Image (tube, rainbow, N blue to C red):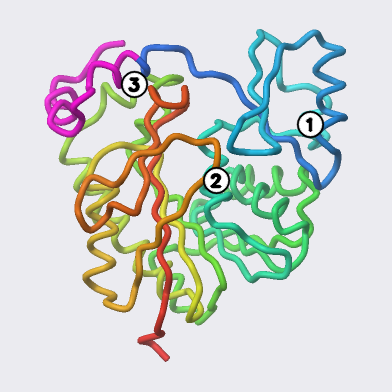
């Protein structure tokens, strides 16, 4: 893995255990799947894995998640039938943090390709309404295919600019904003994300993320909650975005949350300690950042 010098200098300042972080990124990504309980139970998928002599083990923080520790080809007929979803283990966490209930009115603001959308529908047991929004026409196709494959029948797909979503006057109980980011969490599969890393790009992404989080927050009902997540590492794309929202929306509250079985670290600033960072060397996963925000008063009412 070639390390971009600008990336190294930045991250050495960010992390005291930078060498351990890079060593973890050099290891191949561990394969994982999520059983789709809208169609089958976990036991049926486990039987299928055993028949194929696939080594597997439970993901401790997701009851429907399984590590696949073998060279088995995962794009099988069972996968195409929607019995399981091939998903990075860290990618399962934002939906769990959102904690959607059957009957909720939920928005997944940047939904493609549908990993989290289908997981949320599963947690909602196909009850209530889940709006899966995606601005990109090209990416909507993959989103729709995955929703149909999963049998997620409570999902409505929209194609709108997330920055202006609040204009449609839709108010949700819960919103997930898994924001476009610099994707350092994918470095174990694609080292090019490190090669093309630059602080200029980070600043551009941060500006977009701030616009998106403001729109996502304004789309909440009073008392509703927002999960902001990225699969990346920079402070500008994570803690700075949360601090921006907390400054702009004085009634917003950053809440502490826990995912049992998962090792997490606090946010890097005093104002974001209740957010969590997930490091690849701690759980053999991708890098992730997740913050949970509660809307206490509706300033737009």
Percent x, y for residue 252? 34, 73
Say the numbered circle drawn on residue 138: 2
Up/down of 171 relative to 40, above or below: below
Our reading of the magenta stretch's main secondary structure is helix
Give the mark toward the camera: 3 or 2: 3
Where's residue 198, x and y in %?
19, 33
Residue under numbered circle 3: 192
The residues bearing labels 3 and 2 have C-alpha atoms spaced at a distance of 22 Å
Residue 142 x/y as whole percent: 63, 42
Q: Which mark is residue 104?
A: none
Badge 1 element = helix
- Decide: few, some or many residues near mark 1? Use Cα within 10 Å; few <14, some 14-19, many ≥20: some
Mark-to-mark CA distance, 3 and 1: 29 Å
Quarter of the image with the N terminus is top left
Give how far apart the Cα atoms at labels 2 and 1 are.
20 Å
Nearer-the-camera pick, 241 or 2: 241
Residue 20 in magenta stretch: yes
Q: Which residues are magenta?
A: 1-23
């Amino acid at each position: 893995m070639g390390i971009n010098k600008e990336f190294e200098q930045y991250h050495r300042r960010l992390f005291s255990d930078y060498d351990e972080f890079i060593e973890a990124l050099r290891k191949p990504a561990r394969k994982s799947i999520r059983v789709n309980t809208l169609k089958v139970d976990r036991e049926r998928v486990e039987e299928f894995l055993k028949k194929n002599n696939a080594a597997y083990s439970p993901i401790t923080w997701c009851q429907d998640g399984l590590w696949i520790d073998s060279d088995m080809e995962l794009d099988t007929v069972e996968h195409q039938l929607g019995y399981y979803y091939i998903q990075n283990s860290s990618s399962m966490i934002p939906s769990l943090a959102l904690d959607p209930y059957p009957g909720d009115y939920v928005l997944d603001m940047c939904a493609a390709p549908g990993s989290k959308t289908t997981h949320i529908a599963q947690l909602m047991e196909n009850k209530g309404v889940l709006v899966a929004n995606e601005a990109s026409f090209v990416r909507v196709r993959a989103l729709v295919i995955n929703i149909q494959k999963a049998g997620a029948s409570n999902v409505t797909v929209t194609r709108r600019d997330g920055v202006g979503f609040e204009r449609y006057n839709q108010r949700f109980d819960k919103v997930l904003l898994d924001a476009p980011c610099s994707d350092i969490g994918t470095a174990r599969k694609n080292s090019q994300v490190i090669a093309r890393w630059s602080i200029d790009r980070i600043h551009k992404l941060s500006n977009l993320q701030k616009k998106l989080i403001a729109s996502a927050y304004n789309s909440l009902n009073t008392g509703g909650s927002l999960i902001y997540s990225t699969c990346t590492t920079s402070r500008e794309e994570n803690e700075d975005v949360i601090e921006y929202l907390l400054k702009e929306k004085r009634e917003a509250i950053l809440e502490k949350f826990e995912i049992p079985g998962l090792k997490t670290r606090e946010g890097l600033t005093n104002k974001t300690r209740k957010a969590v960072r997930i490091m690849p060397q701690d759980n053999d996963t991708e890098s992730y950042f997740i913050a949970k925000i509660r809307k206490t008063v509706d300033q737009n009412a």
